[in-house]
Image (cartoon, rainbow, N blue to C red):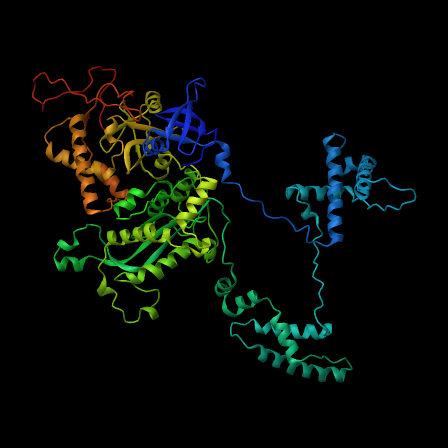
């Protein structure tokens, strides 16, 4: 159960409610516009059912929006570790600023050097009184007792110090002196000898990687020649040994030396912190998303009929390596998104990102998993690399629309995305060696292994294997990065202690990840895939601007509603056809349209009941087949879906009821729909005319 704030707003059946209370098993809500109304209680099961439909909207309060955006402030300068002298100086400056702030708050001065000069006596009086009280620690000053006081800084300097303190959120450590404090003895050699040696030990930082002994020998040889010159010139000789030179080489910064001798990447790999990245505390506070070309070759098909094709056709199907997109939660190491793709693209990255916000248990069960995959919620920050699929406008806009921020750690610094990199490494080490057709991680490791001749898995097989591995094995395996705890147990623990933020509702996700169209609305709203969608805001827009086109987006996973943009705001427009489209996927609807057009090709106008009956049959057959064969749902690209919408749905019209469905007390979630039966009066059903007769209203038709 997600945690809610009393100021949160939830909309149920388009009616806004305030959160009254929340328990472990239920929440209580009250209508926003009626504070005296009785509290209505919803169980977690009911909330989960609502969340999957278009009847649920979640509007987080400002505190909830900013809760994940808070970051522990960077730790200031170490005041405690500074020397006593420096610490006392910093605290005295702080007291000066506090006295100055008091005068400013009382309206005596303004923060300018001139104003402070005019009221300098007032400032010094307040400061000296505070210093005496601070030095004496509450006791009285004895007669004849010496109490030296520090001299205050000049007005201009004091104002600079005050600005610095304000910039650092009044961290007194920022007032410490900034001079270097390392005054250790560099050695017993003379300054001239040290300078002479330093000119030679720089040669150690060379890509040819010379040895320390060679550098020391060359240095001492050159020093002997230099001493011969100095003896003739009457100058003091330089004295050092080869071991002295080697010790100074050993004192060089090992990271910098490795950068020069072995390259920056090797230095970063060797000396980088094992626990890089941003610190996180609760689930989905930070998520890492990346793509990896798996060490496995597959057959590029998802037809599911490879075994039925002739061998020559099977051999002609292309084979190769697929990209694996994975999203992992930093705090728990739980995989919250996983999919395979033919190539890296913004569309595939957005599909992987969308999995972070939805319950994937049904997907896991379809793949044959025995454990749940209900790890989802509201995400705070996403870390990606700078690949073209992640820096695209569409992907960045989708992240922002979902209320999250995106960061791009530096290139070639994988430890800042160490969780997802470690996940891919674990897959390569634990999973890929068990699969036929693996490509190995290098040519040396592969040797003469006949990878091309051992390709037997197709894309469905690979995705099913990955899901089973993640859901049933990886989530329940002890993780060293979690102190021996499993990712599933860590998620349950942190969710219990800190809660999980509510994910974006279906309207927000539809705006972020849906397929966009641009159409001119009619009195029936906008049409998409042969269905009309409308809402009160769209009706007002159509009356005011009947010729203006509007943008709208549709989610292929649920075509029961679309999101329409009106005056830079996105509104949910439900299907005019009724509740039958709620929960229907786009592939199911496309299959239903094909069946309808094939069976009733000669009829110009189809009844709504006929359409709904056909869709119900298609859904039942398709669901039963998927459960029987455990096949994953077929996905189409955005370009393919737009092409189908243009060609398959053109000219398809349904007879809609004149009065929209209304809510019924018998149906608590959704609306009760009564099929509309046209009055035919014993006429030929093929000859129907449902066009409006009012000339002022005009005719309507499907807009292309």
Q: Nearer the viewer, residue 26 or 196?
A: 26
**Residue that sits furthest to the right in the current view:** 144
Q: Quadrant of the C terminus?
A: top left
Q: Nearer the viewer, residue 234 or 348?
A: 348
In this picture, is 332 found above or below 237?
above
Q: Nearer the viewer, residue 389 or 182?
A: 182
In this picture, is 3 found above or below 416?
above
Quarter assignment of residue 250: bottom right
- How many dots with numbers? 0
How far from the left and from the top, in percent, is residue 549? 32, 29
In this picture, is 75 found above or below 584?
below
How far from the left and from the top, in percent, is residue 182? 69, 61
Quarter assignment of residue 216: bottom right
How far from the left and from the top, in percent, is residue 76? 63, 48
- The answer to whether residue 436 is visible is yes
Residue drawn at point x = 35 percent, y = 64 percent: 441
Q: Quadrant of the N terminus?
A: top left
573 left or right of 684 in image: right
97 left or right of 68 in image: right
- The answer to whether residue 565 is visible is no
**Residue that sits furthest to the front in the current view:** 24
In this picture, is 217 found above or below 507?
below
How far from the left and from the top, in percent, is residue 411? 46, 56
Q: Nearer the viewer, residue 540 or 459?
A: 459
260 left or right of 77 in image: left
């Amino acid at each position: 159960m997600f945690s809610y704030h009393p100021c949160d707003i939830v909309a149920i059946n388009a009616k806004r409610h305030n959160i009254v209370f929340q328990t472990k098993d239920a929440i209580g809500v009250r209508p926003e516009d009626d504070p005296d109304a009785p509290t209505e209680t919803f169980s977690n099961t009911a909330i989960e059912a609502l969340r999957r439909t278009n009847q649920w909207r979640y509007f987080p309060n400002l505190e909830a929006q900013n809760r994940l955006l808070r970051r522990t402030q960077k730790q200031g300068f170490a005041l405690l570790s500074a020397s006593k002298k420096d610490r006392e100086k910093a605290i005295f400056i702080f007291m000066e600023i506090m006295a100055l702030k008091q005068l400013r708050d009382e309206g005596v001065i303004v923060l300018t050097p001139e104003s402070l000069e005019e009221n300098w006596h007032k400032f010094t009086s307040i400061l000296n009184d505070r210093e005496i009280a601070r030095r004496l620690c509450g006791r009285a000053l004895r007669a004849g007792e010496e109490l030296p006081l520090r001299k205050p800084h000049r007005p201009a300097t004091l104002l600079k110090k005050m600005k610095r303190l304000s910039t650092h959120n009044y961290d007194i450590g920022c007032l410490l002196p900034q001079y270097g404090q390392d005054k250790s003895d560099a050695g017993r050699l003379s300054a001239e000898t040290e300078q002479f040696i330093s000119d030679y030990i720089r040669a150690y930082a060379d890509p040819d990687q010379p040895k320390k002994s060679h550098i020391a020998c060359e240095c001492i040889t050159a020093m002997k020649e230099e001493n011969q010159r100095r003896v003739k010139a009457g100058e003091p000789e330089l004295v050092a040994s080869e071991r002295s030179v080697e010790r100074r080489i050993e004192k060089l910064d090992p990271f910098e030396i490795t950068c020069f001798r072995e390259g920056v990447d090797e230095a970063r790999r060797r000396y980088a912190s094992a626990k890089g990245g941003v610190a996180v505390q609760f689930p989905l506070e930070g998520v890492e998303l990346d793509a990896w070309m798996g060490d496995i070759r597959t057959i590029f098909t998802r037809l599911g009929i490879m075994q039925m094709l002739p061998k020559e056709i099977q051999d002609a199907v292309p084979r190769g390596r697929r990209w694996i997109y994975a999203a992992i939660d930093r705090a728990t190491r739980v995989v919250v998104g996983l999919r395979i793709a033919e190539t890296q693209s913004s569309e595939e990255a957005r599909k992987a990102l969308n999995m972070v916000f939805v319950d994937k248990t049904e997907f896991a069960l379809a793949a044959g998993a025995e454990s749940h995959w209900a790890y989802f919620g509201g995400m705070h920050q996403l870390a990606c690399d700078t690949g073209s699929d992640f820096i695209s406008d569409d992907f960045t806009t989708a992240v922002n629309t979902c209320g999250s921020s995106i960061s791009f750690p530096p290139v070639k610094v994988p430890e800042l995305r160490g969780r997802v990199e470690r996940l891919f490494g674990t897959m390569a080490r634990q999973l890929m060696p068990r699969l036929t057709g693996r490509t190995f991680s290098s040519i040396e490791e592969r040797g003469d292994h006949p990878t091309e001749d051992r390709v037997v898995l197709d894309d469905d097989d690979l995705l099913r294997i990955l899901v089973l591995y993640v859901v049933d094995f990886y989530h329940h395996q002890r993780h060293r990065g979690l102190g021996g705890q499993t990712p599933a147990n860590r998620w349950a623990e942190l969710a219990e202690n800190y809660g999980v933020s509510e994910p974006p509702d279906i309207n927000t996700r539809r705006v972020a990840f849906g397929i966009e169209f641009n159409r001119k609305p009619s009195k029936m709203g906008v049409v998409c895939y042969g269905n009309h969608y409308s809402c009160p805001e769209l009706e007002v827009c159509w009356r005011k601007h009947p010729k203006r086109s509007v943008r709208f987006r549709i989610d292929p996973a649920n075509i029961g509603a679309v999101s329409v943009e009106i005056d830079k705001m996105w509104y949910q427009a439900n299907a005019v056809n009724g509740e039958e489209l709620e929960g229907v996927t786009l592939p199911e609807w496309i299959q239903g349209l094909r069946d309808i057009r094939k069976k009733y090709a000669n009829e110009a106008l189809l009844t709504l009941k006929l359409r709904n009956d056909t869709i119900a049959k298609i859904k039942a057959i398709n669901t039963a087949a998927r459960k029987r064969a455990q096949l994953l749902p077929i996905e189409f690209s955005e370009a393919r879906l737009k092409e189908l919408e243009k060609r398959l749905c053109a000219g398809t019209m349904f007879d809609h009821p004149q009065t929209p469905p209304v809510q019924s007390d018998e149906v608590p979630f959704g609306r009760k729909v009564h099929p509309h039966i046209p009055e035919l009066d014993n006429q030929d059903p093929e000859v129907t005319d449902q066009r409006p007769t009012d000339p002022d209203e005009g005719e309507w038709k499907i807009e292309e």
